[in-house]
Every structure is written in structure tokens, then in C-alpha cells.
Amino acid sequence: MRTPTPLFDYPKYWAECFGIAPYLPMSREEMDQLGWDSCDVVLVTGDAYVDHPSFGMAIIGRLLEGQGFRVGIISQPDWHSKDDFMRLGKPNLFYGVAAGNMDSMINRYTADRRIRSDDAYTAGGEAGKRPDRASLVYSQRCKEAYKDVPVILGGIEASLRRIAHYDYWQDNVRRSILVDATADLVVYGNAERATCEIAQRFSRGETVDSMTDIRGTAFIRRHTPEGWFEIDSTRIDRPGKVDKIINPYVCTNDLEECAIEQQKGQNTATDTEQTQAITILPNPTLTRDKTVIRLPSFEKVRNDPVLYAHANRILHLETNPGNARALVQKHDNMDVWINPPPIPLTTPEMDYVFGLPYARLPHPAYNGAKIPAYEMIRFSVNIMRGCFGGCTFCSITEHEGRIIQNRSEESILQEIKEIRDKVPGFTGVISDLGGPTANMYRLACKSREIEAACRKPSCVYPGICGNLNTDHSALIQLYRHARELKGIKKILIASGLRYDLAITSPEYVKELVTHHVGGYLKIAPEHTEQGPLSKMMKPGIGIYDTFKEMFDKYSKEANKEQYLIPYFIAAHPGTTDEDMMNLALWLKSRGFRADQVQAFYPSPMATATAMYYSGKDPLHKVTYKSDKVFVTKSEEQRRLHKAFLRYHDPNNWPTLREALQRMGRNDLIGDGTHQLIPTHQPKTAGYQSPRRKNSTPARGNTAKQPILTQHTGLPPRQHGLKTTKKSPKRK
């Protein structure tokens, strides 16, 4: 793979002479006003068009515009025919297609596979404005519109479906989206580098067939080209010599197989300036740039869940841009080839992307209709990308990568000023300075050599890596400088907080609690029991207790009444009924009433989804004889796990009584303070048996009340506080 060209070093395309559009055009009338006869690139998205750097299509569109291309947007087209996909005419270079900021299936369906009544990324919150599996449908319609125009798929939906993947909604394994969509290329992850490279090469007259060397892309091949070495990993339990370099199972959790951990403490100095590179013995016959790992074929992983888990493990071990190799997976008579991940953006490149001329508003075509997702973020600022937490149920790492990509403080402060001066309705409160995680800004490995060679899925599990720099001083300084800006009354932190990192910096916790908590702080312990926590790759609940002590201490010192809002997951792989019972007892002993409940949602390609489907643990070497993971799949058991989280709801008591009796825990039924639920059922409860088919919620069911995670110690006047419908991003 070639060294990437910096985003701002590409030569400008000739259409730069047309200048900057106030909004990227969505109609021929707007194109006429700009003096365009055609678009070079047409972007198709399942979201309403909001010209803001929190929306992927706006970033890609403005980035291409900055390089001189004329970019049009087709937002939420009528997918029932090709007509709406032709509204801007034939693109000169390519169609760029994405389902939107969210996976279209997760956007439309709940974790219980019920259709949602709204869509936060649509004007007015209206549901039904995009099809299921929107990337597939949009791509096919683009091909129908102009069959000779290349179609490039991107966004999180395509990113998480780049290989054969388990589909929760059909309960089977589907082919790579590249095959089903009949697209020409998939760009995965944050795709600025790949998109710029593709546009530039199309503009020079190259064809899509020649674009096989771009990182962060997937494409179809008929055979492995000459000069490449192919590692066969289509089977497991294969005897023979294990090569410590090319073995796809190499992971720093497997100490006997990892050269880095074997040499740890011998070649690594404590001083960052003096850190020496760890040398991994090379195989003289192989180079990683010309090595591809062959995964089990689509047909094999569809029919063998253990092979699916094996393939998932290999994919996640090949995600570090510093050492990842290409992957290939056969689908029928063709190969889906996946190049290594893109090189992370540098700070100057991040500043460039976020400094593009966004209007920071929805397109005027919506006539002022509120777009809920925009309303949530219009006064927030994204300060970084990526996450090295590695939580198995989360898709952030698979999409954005585990290496943190930071903006400069100057760029962030400039965006705050733009919000202050340009965004209508601003009252002086910045709703968030964050990203996938609130407090990973400028945190990174102490050694670039170690980082480039590391294959750990997480830098903070089972404990914080000794090579990780956890200095929060840059973030503290950013907070202080941001709140000193003229016209800024308050800076809130709404992104999920990684509290195991926070406790390494008491100064950060004090700064956060004293100045940046608006009464409540959201954090996500996810569970209390080691079984499910080990499958999530989350720290033990003792770390939460430590953070809570610090939170309470600094809140008291600041003379503020503030509360933690903990979030938990029900029915995650590895969670037994007893685990959920113990979690419920923990909640009750601390007076928590967790009314905002989330059941595990198996998103494509996530490690926890592989556990859910296969019953195996891809965090460790997968064999047919390896230990099984307990998985909750039945609707009745998933409902029970959610009921344990809402132990205080009388509607759940009959279900919990039956379960506790079955578990031999009658001692937890009664009116004592140590008991979980009472013996008698109140007549006003709107309970309906979970075994009753086609049942609907009773009129008095508390599930219809506004959701709120509350502590029993809250003052009564605060019990009715409004909350958003979206849960925070899990960390």
C-alpha cells in the first residue's frame, strides 16, 4: 500500500472555479443557480441533509468540494423506482451511497425487532423515509439509473457488512454487502482518505478496476494476483507448525504467541523519549504488504457457526493500521478482497475536515422542520475520533478505529466561536465537548513502534495497558480555555465517560464535576457480574465504586447536588439469569431504579454478535472444543433479563416471582429490605403474562411513561425531568 497523500495536498479539480456552494445542491434549480451543468459526484443518503460535521455525507461532500469537485446530494430518495436517483442528472465521476449516520435496520427496528415509530434523522422525526438495508436498495437504483456510473458504498452500514455477517433481523448469515448491492467498491471506516483518492483517480481517467491498492476499501477479485502470499485460515484445529508472525491468532492476550509481550520489560523504557522499538523477527519470505489471509468462505461461515466465530476473530485481529494484512473471503466463484484499514488522520487533517465551510444548519428545503438528531448536536463539538476501549457490543472501533484522532485546541475553540456567532438559538451553553468517548482526547500509546505492532483488542481491558498514556492535562486545559471564551456560559460533557481512565486523573474528575456536569452524568458500567463483563471487555464494578466516591467527593466540595446515571445491558452474551438477579440486588441495595433499559442488540460484525450467533468466544482462540458462551435468545428470557433491571416495576413482579421460584430463591420474595420483590401483587398493575401470544401493553403499563433513570434519593420535583429517546454511546 502506498503512503497516503495528505488531504489538503491534492491538486484542485478544474471545477474549483465555481467556488463554494452555500449548501450542496439537492435540485436542478440549485445547480442552475450555481452555474453547474452537471455534478461530478452525487451523494445518496438515507438521512435528511444537514450541513454539519456530525453528519457523514456533509463531511464527504464538503471535502470533495474543497478539492474542486461539484457535489450534489440526493437525500432520502423515493426508492420505489430509479426516477428520484436521476434528479441531479448523470454524475461525471461516481455515485457515493450511504444509508445514513445509523445502520438502517438499527434505525428502524428496536432490539426486540419491533418497528420504531420515529426516525431522528428525518425532518419532523417521521418514520419510513428510508428502506430496510438502504445501502443495497440505493446502490441497485443508482445502477438502474445509469448503469455505467460507478457506485461507491460507504457509511457505517456498509462498513459493518463488508464481509459475510450475521443478520439479527433474518437470523442468518448474509453475504458481503458488496456482492448483494452490485456496487463497485466499499469504503469502510471514516472514509476521507479513500474517497479523495478515488475521486482524484476517476478525474484522471482511471477505471474502478485499477483501484485495488487503496486502504480502507473492499472490492471483488476473481483470484489472488501474482506476487501475493496467501495464508490459508479457512479451517481451525489444523495441526502443524505455527508461525509467530503470520499466524492470524497472534494476540497480546496469548502471551506465548506474542513477541511484544515476551520482550516487555526488556526492551521498553519508562521514559517516552527513550522508548525503544520492539523488534519482531521478520519472515524473510513474507512481507505484510503482500500477504493476504484467506477467511472461511461465505458458504462455510453460513453453515458453521464455529467457523463464523473464527473468521470474526481473525478480522478483529487485523484492524490495526500499523500491522493489518489484507483479508479475502470467497463468495460463490468470486473473492471479496478487503484491504487493510485506512491510516488515521493527523491533527492538521482533522482540523482541515472540521474547518470546511459547513452551514451548520439543515438544508432550507426542509422549511425549518425540526430534525431531532440535529437538535441534539447543534450546540455540541466533536473533539476526536476513535476508541481503544474495545467493548465487544460496540461498533465504534470497527468503524472509526482504535487509534484516537485528535483535533487541535485552536480548531475546537474556533468551532465553539462559530456556534456562538452563527447558530440560531444559541444561549451560551455548549451541550457537549466529546466524541465516541468523552475523555480519550490526546490519549495514545507511549511508543509509536509498540502501537504499530500491537494486536490487543483493547488498551484498557483487563486493565489499563502500561504502555498507554493516560495524561488528561490536554483535556483539562481545553475545558478551561473553552469556558473562558466570551459569550460561553456553560460547557457540558454529554458523551459517555470512560471512568476507569478518569480515575487515573483526580484533577480531571474534579474539573469535570466542578464545572461540566449539569446535575447528571451518564456512565455505563453495563453490569456488575464478572461473567458478562468479561464478554463485554468492561472493567469490574469496583472501578465504578471508586469513581462514584470521587464524583460524590468533588460534588460536595463544589456544593452541588449531582447524580450519576448508570446504564446497564440486559441479555448480553455470557449473562445468566443469576447474573441478572445479582445485578438487580445490587441496584436495589443502592437505591437505583433504572427505568431506561437496553437489551443487547446484535449489530453486524461486532464481537459480541459473533458470540450471540455462534455460542463461542472470539476473544480467545476458537476451536470446536473451546468453551461455550451462554446466550440469551428467546423472547421470554430476554424479557426476564429486562425485568430484573426494572425490578421496581409492579408489572414485572409476576415474571420475577416465577423466575425466582424456579431458581430456588424464594428468600428474595417478600417485604423485607433484603428481598427483591414483594409477595403480593397490587391490583392496579397492568401486568400481562409474557407467555400470552400477540399481547399488547395494558393501558396502565408504566413502559408508556417518559423514560428516566432515577435515584430514589432525588428530590420529588426532579422525578419528572424529560430525557431524550436515544441512549448515550456505549463505552
Image (cartoon, grey):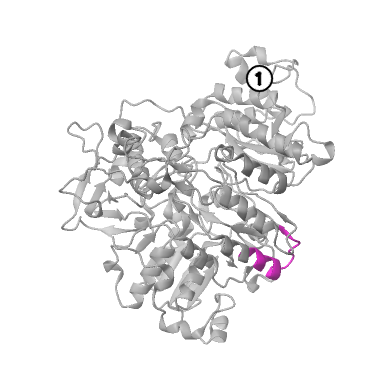
**Residue 378 as seen in the image, left or right of residue 617:** right
Q: Quadrant of the N terminus?
A: bottom left
Asked whether 612 or 142 is in front, the reply is: 612
Asked whether 402 or 532 is in front, the reply is: 402
Is residue 728 located in the magenta-colored stretch of the structure? no
Which residue does the image show at 65% across and 35% down from the upper left?
Answer: 695
**Residue 483 as seen in the image, left or right of residue 540:** right
Magenta range: 415-429
Secondary element type, mark 1? helix
Asked whether 173 or 82 is in front, the reply is: 173
Q: Quadrant of the C terminus?
A: top right
The x, y position of residue 19, in whole percent, is 52, 83
Is 488 located above or below residue 328 in the figure?
below
Is 10 located above or below residue 391 in the figure?
below
Q: Number of callouts in the render?
A: 1
The x, y position of residue 721, in whole percent, is 77, 44
Asked whether 593 or 429 is in front, the reply is: 429
Which residue does the image show at 45% across and 35% down from the upper left?
Answer: 612
The x, y position of residue 250, in whole percent, is 30, 38
The x, y position of residue 561, in whole percent, is 78, 39
**Residue 617 as seen in the image, left or right of residue 666:** left
Taking the image as drawn, is residue 655 in sight? yes
Is residue 420 located in the magenta-colored stretch of the structure? yes
Residue highlighted by disc 1: 657
| Disc 1 packing (10 Å; few <14; some 14–19; many ≥20) | some
Which residue does the image show at 16% across and 58% down from the upper left?
Answer: 226
Taking the image as drawn, is residue 368 in sight? no
**The disc labelled 1 sits on which kind of residue?**
Arg
